[in-house]
Structure formats: C-alpha cells, structure tokens
Amino acid sequence: MTGIYIHVPFCAKKCPYCAFFSEQYGRKTVDNYVKAVIRNLQLYQVNDTVDTIYFGGGTPSLLTAGQISDILEACSKYLHLYQPEITFEFNPTGKRNTYLHDIHSAGVNRLSIGTQSFSDSQLKLLGRTHSVNDGIRTVETAFQVGFNNISCDLMLALPEQSELILHETLETLVKLPITHVSAYLLQIEEGTPFSQNQDLLARCLDDDQSADRYLQTVHFLEDAGIHQYEVSSFAKKGFESRHNLKYWKCVDYLGIGAGAHSCYMGKRFYVPEDVSQFCDGEHQTEIILSENPYDREERIMLGLRTVEGVPAELVKSQKIPLFQKAGYLRIGENGNISLTAEGFAVSNAVISAMI
Amino acid sequence: MDSEKIRNFCIIAHIDHGKSTLADRILEKTKTVAERDMEQQILDNMDLERERGITIKARAVRLNYTAKDGETYIFNLIDTPGHVDFNYEVSRSLAACEGAILIVDASQGIEAQTLANTYLAIEHDLEVVPVVNKIDLPSAQPEKVCQEVEDVIGIPAMDAPRISAKLGTNVEEVLERIVTDIPAPKADTSAPLKALIFDSYYDSYKGVIIYVRVKDGVVKVGDTIHLMATGAEFTVTETGYMTTDRLVNVGELSAGEVGYISASIKSIGDTQVGDTVTLADNPCAEPLAGYRKVNPMVFSGIYPADGAKYGDLRDALEKLQLNDAALSFEPETSVALGFGFRCGFLGLLHMEIIQERLEREYNLDLITTAPSVIYKVTLTDGTVQYIDNPTNYPDPSVLSMAEEPMVKADILVPSEFVGNIMDLCQDRRGTFKDMQYLDDTRVTLKYELPLNEIVYDFFDALKSRTKGYASFDYELIGYAPSKLVKLDILLNGEIVDALSFIVHTDKAYARARKIAEKLKENIPRQLFEVPIQAAIGGKIIARETVKAMRKDVLAKCYGGDITRKKKLLEKQKEGKKRMRQLGTVEVPQEAFMSVLKLDE
C-alpha cells in the first residue's frame, strides 16, 4: 500500500537550526499551491491502495483548515483510500482550538506536534517562538478536540542540555496524552545561523554527552511504555507511524509539492525546490535520483534503522559476530539482525562497515 | 669555436644571498631573455623552486656577452642550489666550470653555506670571484664584508664588485670580471672526445637528454658515443646548447663547451651523472675523475596510498632519479602499508621535495614512514650489517655492537644565541669541539652530532632558537658506537611495522610518549576501543587509548528524503579508501605522517 506525502514548504519564520527548504509565503501563493497539490493528486492516477497521508513541512498549518479539507476531499476522490492514517505536523503556537477541531473534522487523525523541548531556556536557545506552556496546552487541546494519536517531537543534544534538563522534559512529556515520540539529535547544518554562532557552538554537547542524552531518552521512554521502533521513533504498542515505516521498509510513497521526495513505481525522485514552478507547471517535475531503488544496499541501510531489522542473510557480513559481541547488534529469533540502542547511536559506522 | 672566448662559471652563495636574482639580471643584461619575458627566478622553473624560493636543480644556460674589449664571449652559466641537502648538485656543477661567482650578502656577511660552497669550489680548482650583493639595504656593510671574506676565506676581496642584483646596480662589473678573472677552458679539440655528464633529464619525445661539459675533442650528430662507466653506446641525434627555455641543436660541441647531447637513449639506467662520454671508434684513454659520488643519508619508506598505484610510483621514482642522482630507491614490503619503496635522500628537505614532486608532478597520494639513517650493527657471530629500515633491526639478543653515523656540524650564529645553540646541541647528544669568533658579533661553533638527531628537524630548531639567524652545514665523519633500541608501536596489540624506529636509549621514553600522543590525536574514534602502545622488546613503555566512538548517526530522514543518508554512506566508503586497515583498526594516512612531526 502506498503512502502520500504532501509537502508544505512555507514558514512564517525559519528556525535557526533548520536547513530544510521553505519559503516566505503570500496568501495568493498558498492558494495556487493548494490547487497545484490537488491537480497533481488527480494527474498521478494512483492505482494502488493508499493507507497513509502525511502533511509535512515547512509549516502545514499555514494552510487554512478549509484548504486541508479540500486536499483531503481530493484524496478521497482521486485515490483508493483504505483506513488511512492521516498525519499533520503542527507547531504549538497561539490558541488554535478551532483550527485543530476543524482539521480533525476534515479527517486528520494523527497529529505530530513540534514541541521540541519542555524547557523554556532550551526553547529560547532553539529560537522557537512557543513556550513550555504553549506545548503542553497544544497537546491537551488536541486530545480534547478528539485526537487520540498524538506524537511529540523532541530535540536531543541541545546546547547545555544536561541530564537533569532532559529528564525534566521527558517527565513532562510522558504525563501528556501522547502515543508517539520522535526524538532527534541536534545536527549543526552548514549554512544555518546555528553553524555561524560561535558562542552557541561552544556550548554544544560533545559526542559522548550526545550519546548519553540519546540513551537516556531511549531508556526513559521504554520505562514509560513508549518503545523504540526506529532510530528516532518511539511509540506505544500499535501506534507506530505507518507512514514513516514505509520509508524504512521500502514501501512506495508519493511526495507531492515543491521539494517533496518520492519512491514510487520503481524510481526515487524529488520535485525541485521551486514553489512557482510547482504552482505554474501542469504536472510536477520529477528529478530522478535512482531507477533501481530497494537494492541490497538501500534495504540494509534503511531496514537497519528499525528494531525489526533485516534478514541476516541479506547482510552477510563477517563483522556481525564482532558487532554482536560489542553490543551493537542482536540476532532475533526470526533470523533478523537489528541494532541495539547503542548500535543506533553509531549506526552510520556500523552500517557502512557491513555494506 | 674559439675556446678562448668561452667562460664556464657558476654562482655559489648561502641561501637567500641573491643567487637567483643575480642570475636573472645576468640573463637580462646579456639580452638572453627579452625584458617582456622576464619573470623572477627564471632558472628556477620548477613550481616548487619558485614557491620555496630555493634552487633544487642545477641548470645550465648559454649567453652571449660583448665585453668592453669589443669581443663577444660565450658564457655558460650553471645555476646551483644553496641548501645544505643539495651540496652534491653544487659539486656536479663545479666540475663543469672554470670559475665561480661567490655572492655574499652585504648585510649578513659570511654564512655556513658561503664557507662550505667556497671550499668546494677551491677543491675543484675554480677561480673564485667574490661579489658583495644587496648594497641597497640600509644595513649593508660592504667594506666590512669584503674584509671578512679576506680574513675568513682568505681570498682577495677588497676590489670585489659591490652590487645590488635586485636593482641591477653594477651588474656589468660582474660580467666584466667573468671575462677578465675566470680563465678560458683549457681545451684540446684534436684529442679524443672526453666529456663529463653533469646532469640529465628525461624528455618524453627525445628520450634521455644529457648535459655535458666537453673537456677534449668534438662530438657531432651521427657520432657513436660510448659511456665509459655503463658501457652503453648510442648514436648522437642532436647536440647543441641550452637557452632558458629550449635546446638549440647546432650539430656539434667541441672542447671547452657546455651543452647537451640527445641520442635516443631510452633507459635512464644507461646514463649516470658523473660518467665520461667518449667516441666508440676513437675513445679516450682514461675517464674523467668525475666527482665525489654522493650517498643518501636519510631513508624512508614511500608507499602509494592506493596500492594499485605501485607501478605509477615506480615509474615516477625512475623519472625523478634521472634528474636526481642522489635519490635511491628499492622495493620493500610492509605488513601495514603493502608494497612500496625504501628511498634514500640527502636530507630531510630533499625528502620533502621528492615527496612533493611525486605528489604534484605525478599526481600520487603517498604515505611516508619516519626517516631513518643507516645504522651499523655487529652481531654476536661477528657479521656486520647496515640497517636502513628499522623493521630489520636485529633482536638485542644477537646484537653485540650498534653504531650510528656521526656528522661534523659547523654552525654560524650571532654571539647572543650561543647559549641557546649549545643547549640545543647538548639536547641532541652533541659533543662540543670548538668555538671561534668570526668577528665581534659572530661565532662559529663546531659540534659532533649523531646524524639521526639532525635529520628530523634540527634546522628548524636552529632557526627558531636564533630568530632565524643561525646557519648550518654538516658533513658525515663516520660511525660511533651508541646505545640504540628499536621502538615498536602497537595498535590493538599488534606491531605496526611502518611505525617502528630506532632511537637512543636515553630518548626512548620521551619519544614513545610523544608518538603515542600524536597517534591518539590522529586516529579517529572507531567502533572499538583502540589501545596504542609503544614497546621496546616486549616491554610496554607508553600507552594511550582511542576510546570507542559513541555517536555517529543521521537522526533525521525528513519526508522520505534519503539522499543525505546515501551521500553520507558514500562519503564514509570514500573515507575508508584513505584509511589503512590494520587488523581491526583503521588508520588514516595522516597518522603515519604525524609521527614525522613530533616537535610541532
């Protein structure tokens, strides 16, 4: 079953650590953009059943609830939907009870909230405009309007993030009515304001401290019944993100919008990061990255991001026993090899050693 | 050609006293190079020479000069290097000349290389013409410097031309002195051909080109030449002289001239610099004396970073050797580094230059092992071995005596720095021999030092302890018994042969600690902890640990964009190619190089 990813490349303000594509937006541009998304949903004539839809960004909430509704109606019209998981990325800014209520009514059933941290000093450092209270209130409001599948984003290894600061954030987090956590290690991206800020860089955690925060998170969430199922993803049983798992399990997903990536019908491609080109063009432009996706290397590289792992016979590396002994990976009863939390922390090195 | 009108000369000087600048001016004044084509250091046409401001290769060029007596003379100017490592190049050039212009800096006065080169010239019976340069400098003291030349070297110098090569001041006077003071070559054109090979290089179209100084007889296109040392014979296809940028084929060279011979010589092994060229059908009776053959003093292993480039490295070394008689190499194998060559050099600068030329001109990526000298060991059964590779150093149980090469070093230094230099020499296990005042402010110190103490960074250390004022020259004086040990480096418990070296017992601990620290800095964290140990025999004397890596993860794969992850994986694969896999440990090339620079 295919997943649909809808990219909304607009941001009111760019976060200083973010290197992903987004543009300043105008009302008119957004209107045209939505039309182009709907047009493309029709033009692709997706035959396969679709069971996930994901609104990512950028900031999807810069679209009106009406526009979300229009897009989802188009999805029902042009796609063969089957019990879809419909995720929406949402930032905890302002009082938007009505908005949340409206998109829930439109069909969105999973909310991914960019809480990032439950420490005001850490949020300020990240340049986020919301407070800890905004984050808590947004989760609670979402739950109240009917969302029963809520994910929160956390950023780990932030400058000056002590064990205690992170512990407090995690404690606040697990008390909320959430089902899922995405926890990312901060990565200083070239070209971002963060990468230029010497003072901030000096306060960043070193690799050992970063690894400590990562493992702290894994263990804390595990104890709270939120299990790790992928390098950066944690969920209560049954609430794993069906959409994101497609990325790692080599299942097709079609991305629509400027800058969206796809692996669809035997090829990997992306759409140029050009909003006006996307709006003005009939069919979105596809830049091909690969015409033979899901080869051995990809399957190992992506599959080993999940706790399910990949069949040992696919990897066939002499290093497996060595890594097993070092505690980086385990071999399951089903014959799959998968990485441990310690293994995930060094997964680039482990995977590249085995490919 | 009338040999009376020929002047063959070279320019000798301490480094930076203006040798290449004077050569430039001479080329300009004799209109050998049009002013519009003039660039600085025109004879130093190797990129490396220009960048470093030094001359590495000797070069010969023919000029015409119309003197004040109305006659036109042919000048053969042979440019020579100034650095102590390249003394052999100097002596090759000297053998082709009748005279030498000795440049002395009017503000610096005599330096160690001034003395060393002058003595070499006198040894070769050359007429030495002193010239005082840089008179334009505010600190110039030409009278004092002339007096110093007379007092210290003992040649008349009070009427030496006072010039500024930079500004062109009084350069004509130098040209006149070449005519009046340097003798014309003694030449017998009717005698059998006798010519000295003083340089050679490989031209991809013409094969080996040899530079010769014809002492007797004539060589013509079509002649069959016989190279006396190698026994090889060839038919001359071209012969003539060199300008700054090309060869001019004039069909014949006769006694007294300096020029080139091209004879479709394919193999570089057939031409030996210092050999005598004669005619096959009318050979001369005795070869020329040639000159002191130089022996490499410093050895190191050179390996291609990419094992598949071994053949390319061999070809490149063969080509460089053609122009560089002092470079030696033979194949060797290292467990750590694979197939490579043990190369012999005159000194550390020579080694650096060869390395850089291999990398730049032949586009090779290299790993070099720590430089070593040749140790002489006597085994308990009485056999004597010379060891140029630490890996082959015998086990102490079968060793009855170890000896190391010693040098006699002359160090010229302003008197205020004498204390610093004595400390340095002491630290380098030197034995004080003598100290003399050249004048009120400058001192010459004589020390005997182990060669292995000066091959690494002695020159740099000298400079840094004297604000750059010290100058230095050395010559090998033989072997002396010493307390030596072989220090092994172990990574993850296994000896890395390419990192072993020989060191004096008293210095072993300090060196071991430093190397372990350097390696720790240069070996990246890996999936497993890497112990670094230094050991003498089986005994560990230093230890460091590279901790296991803990974080190497790309957290975010946003919206299914896996390109970053793929790129990262590609980069890691690429990075692995630059690593040497030693057992389970991956060692970057830089780690091998870092142990060469322990004093930084």
Image (cartoon, coloured by chain):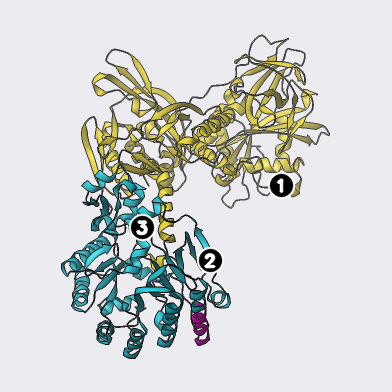
**Discs 3 and 1 lie in a common subunit:** no
Q: Chain of mark 2?
A: A
The image quadrant where one finds the N terminus of chain A is bottom left
Viewer-nearest residue: B48 or B439: B48
The residue at which mark 1 appears reads as: B38
Density class for disc 3 (Cα within 10 Å; few <14, some 14-19, many ≥20) is: many
Mark 3 to mark 1 CA distance (whole Å)? 62 Å
Which element type, helix, strand or loop, lies under badge 2? loop
Q: Is residue A352 visible?
A: yes
Density class for disc 2 (Cα within 10 Å; few <14, some 14-19, many ≥20) is: some
Viewer-side label of 3, 1: 3
- Residue B360, position as x, y percentages in the image: 55, 42
- Residue A68, position as x, y percentages in the image: 41, 83
Density class for disc 1 (Cα within 10 Å; few <14, some 14-19, many ≥20) is: some
Instruction: Tell me which chain appears cyan.
Output: A
The residue at which mark 3 appears reads as: A302
The mark tally for this picture is 3
Q: Is residue A18 left or right of residue B362?
A: left
> Looking at the picture, which amino acid does disc 3 mark?
Leu
Q: Is residue B433 visible?
A: no
Q: Chain of mark 3?
A: A
